[in-house]
Image (cartoon, rainbow, N blue to C red):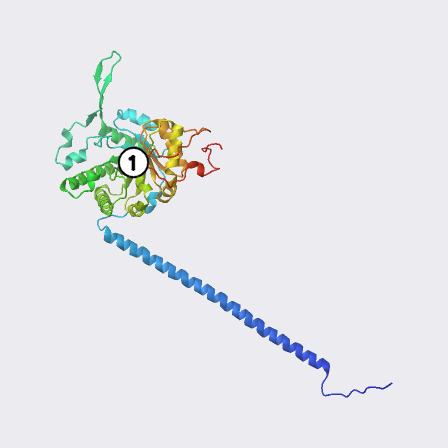
Amino acid sequence: MRRHRYVRSGYRAGTVKKSRKKLLVRIAFVLGCALALTLFSVLLGSYLNKKAEESLALSSNTSITEETSENIDELFPEGVPVKDPDEAKRELCGADIDISSGDADHLRELIDGLSDKYNAVSIRITSAEGKLAYISPALMEYVGMDSSLADTKVTLAGSNTSEDGDEEPAEAFDTFENLCAVIEAAKERGLRTVALFSTDSSSLELSATALSKCEIDSVIAGELFSLGCDEILIDGLFEAEGQIPHETLKAMIRYLAVLRSRSSDMLIGINFPDNVYLIPQNASVIKTLSQYADFLAISIGTSVTDPSEAYSAVYDNCYSLKGNFSMYNLRGIIQAEDTQLSSAIFASLKELSAKSFQFTVYVADPVFTISGDTPSTDGATETGVSNDNANRKEDYENTETSAEDPQ
């Protein structure tokens, strides 16, 4: 057998393997470091870019806010912005008190009989005809009359019929004394006082007569503040259907400024019909007004006479306003002369997430039981405006309420 001879060389095979292994480890280490550095650079760049965008956005928002504020000041130089915007978030439930419905003792009994659901009383300062419900000492002084010489008693319209069938003169009450008594009784119970004051759009004109009327309204507002009223709600400034013109908006802001000149820190709100809030073009107007009025309100009523139908009608008509109730804490002014209808509207508005209410009829305890067969009204609305884009109650299955119809 032939033997093979191996010739020794200057190196060994094992040494070659070890050198290659070290080389591969070094290459892998370098690649790993490069990959780690690349990943770190990408993450750092992304983080810095995000911070830069946030800083730019913040700077832009600040500029927009400042620019908007400056533009508003330029557009409405006579306006007085609200001092505390958070006041608009205050939740309020005001019971109606008619200062011409009886003497002071009777009105105190009405306040004592109110449910704990209320945290305020709503005092109607004007009659249904828009006339002041009491003889104003401040107004008499404003026109140069001696208020001490005036008879402040107001006689109710109509007459009383005795048991014998004979007509007797209608009873007369000192409504100014009643007003003071209601405010005092409300304060004793820890209730806020809200004066519901009706005027008309003529107060927004630039004529001498309109400016005088505006001044008179401010005198009344100042008197209410001096008597202890916490808030005044102005109704009737805009009753037309359609978009609020810019000039009307400007006049409203000027009107609010005149009222504030005498009413100091008393909160001032504006009430509008529901059609004002249902018009999309009025959204910017409402937004602007919210910066000058301490709170906004909406008139809610219905022409139906059945409480269950009223509940469904209000729910259907006002569903599209649900966002406004939340955004502006719109105060629902429940305009119904019947206690059961008022309670039904109250329950419906609560179902729509409304948090603030004022009644226009005395309801000691607003309770409404929703029956299982409560109907839902489709088609034309009952509050004077039809919103074809509004979704109806049956389109929104809400498991949190027992007010829906069984399917």
Q: Which of 191 and 131 is in front in this view?
A: 131
Q: Left or right: where does residue 17 sit relative to residue 70?
A: right
- In the image, taking residue 286 as reference, residue 28 lies left or right, namely right
Query: Looking at this view, is 359 or 20 the one in front?
Result: 20
Note whether residue 114 is visible: no
Residue at image mark 1: 194
Q: Where in the figure is residue 355, as x and y percent of width and height? A: 38, 38
In the rendered view, tell whether residue 237 sits above or below residue 306: below
Left or right? Give the position of 239 relative to 6.
left
Occupied quadrant, residue 105: top left
Residue extending furthest toward the top: 164
Q: Which amino acid does label 1 sit on?
A: Val
- Residue at 44 percent across and 62 percent down: it is 50
| Number of marks | 1
Q: Residue at x 32, y 57 (%)?
A: 64
Picture coordinates of residue 20, whole percent (x, y): 66, 78
Does any portion of residue 271 appear in the rendered image? yes
Question: 11 above or below 199?
Answer: below
- At x 23%, y 28%, the residue is 175
* Residue 295 at x, y percent in the picture: 31, 42
> Relative to the observer, which residue lies in front, 21 or 120?
21
Quarter of the image for residue 9 reads: bottom right
Residue furthest right as drawn: 1
| Residue 326 location (% of width, % of height) | 38, 43
Mark 1 nearby-residue class (10 Å; few <14, some 14–19, many ≥20): many
Depth check: give the residue in front, 91 or 25: 25
Q: Report helix, strand or loop for mark 1.
A: strand
The N terminus lies in quadrant = bottom right
